[in-house]
Amino acid sequence: MPTESTFILASIFIILAATGWALGYFGERDDQPPLNIDYLKGLNFLLNEQTDKAVEHFLKMVRVDNTTIETHFALGNLFRKRGEVNRAIRIHQNIIARPDISCEQRDQAFYSLAKDYHHAGLLDRAEVLFRRLSVDSLFQTQSLYSLTEIYEIEGEWKKCINCSEKLAKVTRKSFDLQISHYLCELAEIAVTNGDVKKSLEFIGSAKKLKTMTRRTDLVKAKCEKLRKRYTNAIKIYRDIIQNSAYLITEALPELVDLHEQLISLDELNEFINKIRQSNQKLSRDIGYTVIINNIYDVSSLNDCVNSYIENDSTLKEFLGISHDKKDKLKIETISLDRIRLSLSKLARSTSRYQCESCGFSSQKLLWLCPSCKQWETQRPFSNVQFDSILQRMPLISD
Ligand SMILES: [Zn+2]
């Protein structure tokens, strides 16, 4: 079966002949055979599905110069987009090897080659080229973006900050949110290495930015906990729960843990009961978070779980509980603990977070979306994803 590449190359060979341009082009060169033989040779390779030979033939047949260079670039980029990176690399290297192209064309070829390497996962080679282009070239901005992406993959957070600061200057846009995440990454590494002081220094730098992530507070609370400044940590976690509910899955288990350690669950109950009375949506989110994290034996949190179960209409359908208020107590005939345990299992078998930008979902919170490469776009689901469970269930036939 001929591949799409075969058609692409065949089209180029045919266009070269059909336009008559190529005839004139080769006609001026005494050292070349006539085009009809040349392009027939190329087509022959294609018909025999020898795409690599056809590419080599194309490179020998069509010299890189001002009239043909765009065809070379187009072909190289087409191959990369199709995932045939080795062929793209071959074409772009061939352009670079020509001594008679302009500086701009050479930069374009280096940029295309860097993209090929990036695409192929050859990050070291891509980095070298993007770094060269990130200084005073036509591809400075794109190269800085690509470099940042590479450094994010490699976890080179200081280099990410450096690139983002350069990008802010070049594009006159704010990169503060990204930079605050890079600082949080560094702060978390410092905490893991037991260097709380260093971690707090990174958080301090993040707080100086005009825009920053609330993740800084999560890291700060962790530091305060490690420094045994429990009251400060509790205050931060409470603030996150009340004002940044999308981080509840990160903050609530930590808050419960602190109160358990300090044997001050009464204080926690008082805080949660106030939320239950004033904010039903947040109360339900707390209930769901408690289910997923298997938090038990805290009366106010148990109440949130019960109210979550009672108010989830899809769940009630599943359990066969009537919507009629008179039957409300029917739910009590079913063991809430059993429901809770089953829900916990179901929730843990489905995605818990979803990117608001591209829809990518995952079990763990990912600050950087691996799909759309944006920071802090994931939000937790606030209920069990019954749809995705049903989709995974085999169809039962009679
Ligand atoms: Zn995304």
Image (spheres, rainbow, N blue to C red):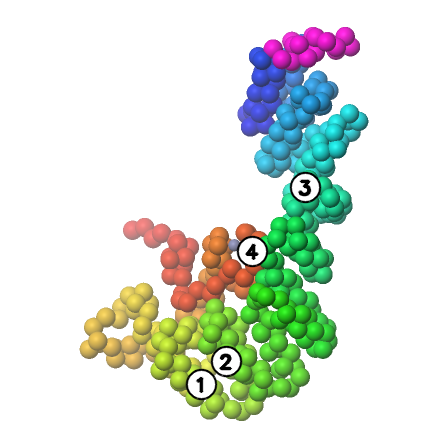
Disc sitting over residue 374 in the figure: 4
Q: Give the left or right position of residue 274, taking residue 83 as reference.
A: left
The residue that disc 3 covers is 139
Task: Check the image and report above or below for 167 versus 367.
Answer: above
Asked if the magenta segment contains residue 127, the reply would be no
- Label 4 CB-ligand 1 distance < 8 A: yes
| Residue kind at label 3, given as amino acid type | Phe
Task: Check the image and report above or below for 20 versus 387.
Answer: above
Q: Are marks 2 and 1 in contact (CB under 8 Å)?
A: yes
Q: Earlier in the sequence, mark 2 or mark 3?
A: 3
Task: Give the residues in magenta.
Answer: 20-36
Q: Earlier in the sequence, mark 3 or mark 1?
A: 3
The residue that disc 2 covers is 238
Q: Earlier in the sequence, mark 3 or mark 4?
A: 3
Residue 149 in picture, x, y percent from top left: 65, 52
Mark 3 or 1: in front is 3
Number of residues whose C-alpha sits closer than 10 Å to that of mark 2, classed few (under 14), some (14–19) or many (20 or more): some
Task: Check the image and report above or below for 287 versus 131.
Answer: below
Q: Is residue 39 visible?
A: yes
Q: Earlier in the sequence, mark 2 or mark 1?
A: 2
The residue that appears at 59% across and 62% down in the rendered structure is 177
